[in-house]
């Protein structure tokens, strides 16, 4: 794929955030981010937990953000994503539409078709990546990743709000092998929120308060208040900003 300007379908999670970083490292320019706020917590296509925090993440990276809402109905939500891409294309010039997909053929086929409908190239730079090595690499790169939803056997309420560190990652990998789910949560087993990483050049996200909803076997975390604060060594670089 030749270098070009890219719009990234962005969730605030680890995969779409690292996609932004990887695209820049490959010589592309991120023209804008596109985030969809779904009213359906069980969306087939979209990340839902604490999605509002993308506004702070976009500021941390310094990228413009286009947002759209959807009822989250299966297949119909594609029309809302399409509307968001159309709005983005009217404001920003880009030739590539990128997503952070790793293994979900359901999502990739639909994003590929969406890109083609606009005459854009579709990119999924993480597609097929080894999930265990990928997660370890994110920690090595300095990613701070918080778990914001869980819906898989072996993952209880205690995982909500937990940051993935070296010890918790090894525990997560063991549980994933035991229960047979994707450790990177590609199958909807969980969702994440990036609090800090190398591409957050204008500050890091600090969570001030959140609310956990637990339904016995699955649950989610809703960030009630967060702000962008200076990264260590960059005093005054980012102003505080509640969500």
Image (spheres, grey):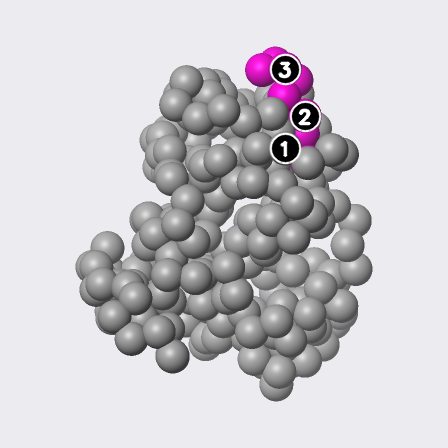
Q: Is residue 129 visible?
A: yes
- Residue neighbourhood size for the residue with mark 1, other residues' Cα within 10 Å, grouped as few (<14), some (14–19), many (≥20): some
- Residue neighbourhood size for the residue with mark 2, other residues' Cα within 10 Å, grouped as few (<14), some (14–19), many (≥20): some
Q: Which residue is mark 2?
A: 121
Are discs 1 and 2 less than 8 Å apart at CB? yes
- Residue neighbourhood size for the residue with mark 3, other residues' Cα within 10 Å, grouped as few (<14), some (14–19), many (≥20): few
Q: Is residue 122 magenta?
A: yes
Q: Quadrant of residue 134?
A: bottom right
* Among the two numbered marks 1 and 3 on one chain, the one whose residue lies closer to the N terminus: 1
Instruction: Looking at the picture, tell me which residue is in the foreground, 202 or 214.
Output: 202
Total marks in image = 3
* Among the two numbered marks 1 and 2 on one chain, the one whose residue lies closer to the N terminus: 1
Front tag of 1 and 2: 1
Q: Which residue is mark 3?
A: 119
Which quadrant: the N terminus? top right
Residue that appears at 56% across and 80% down = 165
Q: CA distance from mark 1 to mark 3?
A: 14 Å
Q: Is residue 12 magenta?
A: no
Front tag of 1 and 3: 1
Residue that appears at 62% across and 41% down = 28
Residue that appears at 29% across and 75% down = 235
Q: Which residues are magenta?
A: 116-123
Q: CA distance from mark 1 to mark 2?
A: 10 Å
Q: Position of residue 157 (x, y in %)?
A: 44, 71
Label ID, residue 4: 1
């Amino acid at each position: 794929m030749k270098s070009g300007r890219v719009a990234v379908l962005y969730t605030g999670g680890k995969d779409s955030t690292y996609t932004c970083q990887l695209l820049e490292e490959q010589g592309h320019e991120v023209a804008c981010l596109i985030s969809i706020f779904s009213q359906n917590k069980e969306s087939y296509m979209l990340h839902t937990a604490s999605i509002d925090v993308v506004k702070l993440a976009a500021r941390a990276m310094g990228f413009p953000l286009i947002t759209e809402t959807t009822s989250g109905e299966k297949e119909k939500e594609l029309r809302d994503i399409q509307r968001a891409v159309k709005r983005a294309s009217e404001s920003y010039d880009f030739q590539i539409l990128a997503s952070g997909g790793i293994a979900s053929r359901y999502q990739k086929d639909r994003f590929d078709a969406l890109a083609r409908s606009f005459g854009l190239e579709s990119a999924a730079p993480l597609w097929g990546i080894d999930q265990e090595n990928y997660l370890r690499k994110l920690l090595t790169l300095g990613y701070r990743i918080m778990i914001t939803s869980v819906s898989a056997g072996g993952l209880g309420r205690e995982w909500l709000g937990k940051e993935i560190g070296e010890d918790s990652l090894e525990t997560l990998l063991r549980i994933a092998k035991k229960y047979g789910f994707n450790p990177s949560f590609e199958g909807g087993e969980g969702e994440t929120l990036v609090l800090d990483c190398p591409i957050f050049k204008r500050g890091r996200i600090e969570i001030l308060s959140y609310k956990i909803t637990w339904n016995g076997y699955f649950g989610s975390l809703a960030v009630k208040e967060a702000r962008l604060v200076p990264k260590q060594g960059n005093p005054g670089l980012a102003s505080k900003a509640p969500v």
